[in-house]
Amino acid sequence: MPEVLSAPLVVEFPFTRSLGPVQSAFLTGLRERTVLGVKTSGGQVLVPPVEYDPATAEEIRDLVEVAPTGTVTTWAWNPAPRRDQPLRTPFAWVLVRLDGADTALLHVLDASGPDAVRTGMRVRVRWAAERAGAITDIACFEPYEGEPGAPAAPHDGRFADPVTGIVAPARLDYTYSPGRAPTDYLNALAERRTVGERCPSCRKVYVPPRGACPTCGIATAERVEVGPRGTVTTFCIVNIKARNLDIEVPYVYGHIALDGADLALHGRIGGIPYDQVRMGLRVEPVWTEGGRYPDHYRPTGEPDADYDAYKELI
C-alpha cells in the first residue's frame, strides 16, 4: 500500500490597520474599563460600534457609554479550547446585549459547564488585569446576579494616549493530506522529476496535477513528465520580508510554464538581478542537497521565448 503523505501547514498573516475615531475610542475605552457604543439617527445603540449606519449607510459618531453588565441572547459551548482562545478551560461562546445597547457583542463566558449557561442569563464583564486597548481587555464575561446597569449616557470619546492602530493576527493551522495525483507529483519531485497528468478529452497537461481536468471536469490518470526547463510567463517583485522566510528582499516570484505543460506553476527566480527578470525568460530548477522540491529557478542562458509560445499560459 503506498505511503499516505501528510504535513502540518500554517497560514499566518498579521494584519496591521489604522483606526478611525469611533474604533479608536472604543478600544481605548476598553483599556480604561469603559464600554462605548454609537447611536444611530434612529436611536439605536450599537455595541461594538461601527462608523456607518448599517441601515442608512450614513456616518455616525455619537458615542455613548453602556453598562458592563448585560444579557446572554444566544450561546454555544466550547469543550476543548484551542491555542490563543480567550480561556484555557472549557467555556461558552456568547452573544451579550449589554445594558443600554440594542445589539449584542460576541465574547466568551466563564462557566462551570453547559448546564450553567442559558439564554437570558445575566452576566458582567471581567476585565483583564493588564489592558492595552484591544477586545481582549475584556478577559471574559461571568455570571452576575446584580441590578441592571445605568442607561446609556453620552460620551465624548476622549481619552489620554488614544489607541490609533492595531495588529490583528490571522492564523490557520491544519494538516494537509494530498490525494493520489498530488502524491505522485510530490514523490516525483523528490526524485528531481516533474510530472503532470494529461486530460483524455482536451489533451492538456496540468502541473501540478489534481486528478481531474479543471476545464473538462473529468478524471485524469495519464502521467506526463515535463520540464525541467520552462519559461517565465509573469512575475512579481517581493519587497516585504516574510516572517520565518530566510530570503533577502527584493526577490522575484514568477509563473513558470514548464516545457510540455499547459498550466504555469509558481516558483522563486534567482541567479539573476531582480530587475533583469522578464517575461519569456528561460529558466531551469535548482535543487538543494536533500531537498524534495526545487529551491528556485535560474536562467538557462537560452534566448528568450517568443511571446506567441506562451501567451496562452499567462
Image (tube, rainbow, N blue to C red):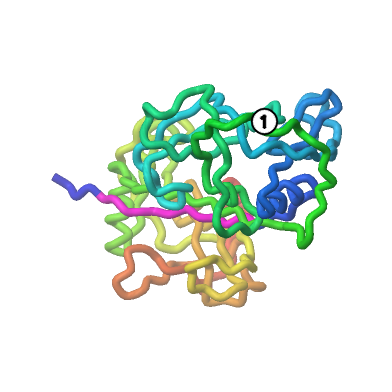
Residue at screen point 30% across, 42% down: 179
User: Residue 56, position in %: x, y?
Assistant: 82, 26
Left or right of 151 on screen, residue 238: left
- The answer to whether residue 103 of the structure is visible from this angle is yes
Farthest residue in the front direction? 146
Q: Is residue 43 above or below residue 144?
A: above
Q: Is residue 303 above or below residue 131?
A: below
Give the quadrant of the N terminus.
Answer: top left
Instruction: Say whether residue 7 is magenta.
Output: yes
- Magenta range is 5-15
Residue at screen point 29% across, 62% down: 190
- The answer to whether residue 309 of the structure is visible from this angle is no
Secondary element type, mark 1: loop
Q: Callout 1: 10 Å neighbours few (<14), some, many (20+)?
A: many
Q: Is residue 210 above or below residue 190?
A: above
Judging by the rendered image, the residue that carries numbered circle 1 is 99
Secondary structure that dominates the magenta span: strand
User: Residue 134, position in %: x, y?
Assistant: 63, 52
Q: Looking at the picture, which amino acid does disc 1 mark?
A: Asp
User: Residue 159, position in %: x, y?
Assistant: 79, 55
Instruction: Say whether residue 295 is magenta.
Output: no
Left or right of 156 on screen, residue 140: left
Residue at screen point 69% across, 43% down: 35
Q: Tell which of 304 and 274 is nearer to you.
A: 274
The total number of labels drawn is: 1
Residue at screen point 34% across, 48% down: 175
Q: Tell which of 203 and 39 is nearer to you.
A: 39
